Amino acid sequence: MQWDIVIGLEIHVQLATKTKIFSGSSTAFGAEPNTQASAVDLAMPGTLPVPNEQAFRYAVMFGLAVNAEIGRRSVFDRKNYFYPDLPKGYQTTQLDHPIVGPGFVDVDLANGRSKRVRIHHAHLEEDAGKSLHEDFHGMTGIDLNRAGTPLIEIVTEPDMNSAEEAVAFAKKLHSLVSSLGICDGDMSQGSLRFDVNISLKPKGSNELGTRTETKNLNSFRFMEQAIAHEVERQMDILEDGGRIIQETRLYNGDRDESRSMRSKEEANDYRYFPCPDLLPVVIDDAFIESARDLLPELPDDRKARFKEQFGLNDYDARLLSDDARLAAFFEEAASHGKDAKLAANWVLGEFSARLNAEDKAVTQAPITGTQLGQLVARIADNTVSSSGAKKVFEALWNGDGNNADAIIEAQGLKQVSDTGALEQMVDEVLAGMPDQVAQYHQETDTKKQKKMLGGFMGPLMKASKGQGNPKLFTEILLKKLNG
């Protein structure tokens, strides 16, 4: 039987405020457990929450960036449940009156396709703490530092129909909130977490199937794997005549396994009611416009500018514009490198490959955009060959110098472009390869002749100790062989 896959996402975005949503406690990551949880965060008797204005501003900025309606009257509710990492016994969140209403995000897909994913709403709420299961002699520890950290929870419509679409949307959203500066985007630290709702229905049917929710996916790779795993699991059950249970599941990416966590609650299970400690917050036009004034260049606008300003193709412009930090690094390199396309190639190639290999963020790279740009400039003006440039890059990365010119000089990597010297090398190499020269002259197919030039380049590069200009070598070779 053929099935349609239906996917919707719920995304928890940890806002980059300095303090928590209802208290003055710090949100800094990495502090000793339970050193940043105040009495307000735990709703101790006699304490009252005070809303964080910056959290509202960030939420409005997000709403404006996704073309959404802004909730002029924003109301907080208590969502009642007791998890060990939220000892208040309830979560302060928003239900019927969220800060952000319906909006949309347009997503680029493979082969030039695009898809519009609708945003149902986004609401402000507080994060829970964290359960720690290691080094406690079989017991579980609780770190409440994260309790009260401001979140926006973004809820999409079930508009995605494949893992490709869901991951593309997730990446676009990551790019968006990072570019806005409202979230640091560090998924390894839980700053961005995805819950994936998945259901199957017979192909062409208008009736949605029963959905499951896979919680807390913090990498795009795990999201893709979790969707594939859950789709296969549901398909096997349905085709064996079983039925899908609405439930919350957890996915282990290391073992490619999922397990049931609990039956999926409905809204009435949480016994929502308006928070008696917080008045409704009214957003006026002035506040919205002040948030609009803070909007930076967004990824789609940056992509269009990169194409126009630097002459990049659509693919390169998209890769460079999606990550605000990588985009800034590229612009710095391009401004010093004289050749934007060549700078883009190095940023997306050698530089990004090294970041991935060492699991580093752009901001952790030991090389600056200026340094890479200076290296690109030396490639563009033929001071150094492509192979020599890789040696310079390696030296820069390892801290064996902080200037491309100095490294080129110190390591003797300057490319020989003296045509007189190169002509002499060509004459000597051709004189030592009479059989190959004869074969070249006997060949009438120009394409095959072009391939045969490669046979001369090896000895020429050896003769020049790898420092001969390949382009000039080729020009001189053609003149000598065809003259």
Image (cartoon, rainbow, N blue to C red):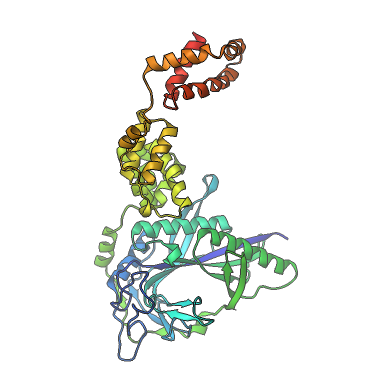
Determine whether 387 is above or below 445 in the image. below
* Most distant residue in the bottom direction: 45
User: Is the residue 20 above or below the residue 180 in the image?
Assistant: below
Query: Relative to residue 393, is residue 188 depicted above or below?
Result: below
Give the image location of residue 230, x and y in percent: 62, 66
When asked about the image quadrant of residue 21, the answer is: bottom left
- State the residue lying farthest toward the right: 240
Mark yes or no: residue 152 visible.
yes
> Image quarter for residue 92?
bottom left
Name the residue at the top extreme: 483
Q: Is residue 300 left or right of residue 156?
A: left
Q: Residue 293 in the image: state x and y as whole percent.
A: 26, 58
Q: In which quarter of the image is the N terminus?
A: bottom right
| Depicted 267 relative to depicted 107: above or below | below
Q: Report the side of 231 relative to 304 (left or right).
A: right
Q: Nearer the viewer, residue 203 or 42?
A: 42
Residue found at x 53% / y 80%: 266
Q: Nearer the viewer, residue 475 or 122?
A: 475
Residue 289, percent across and down? 26, 62
User: Which residue is at 40% across, 55% downward?
Assistant: 361
Residue at screen point 75% across, 71% down: 241
Q: Which of the two residues, 127 or 390, is positioned nearer the viewer here?
A: 390
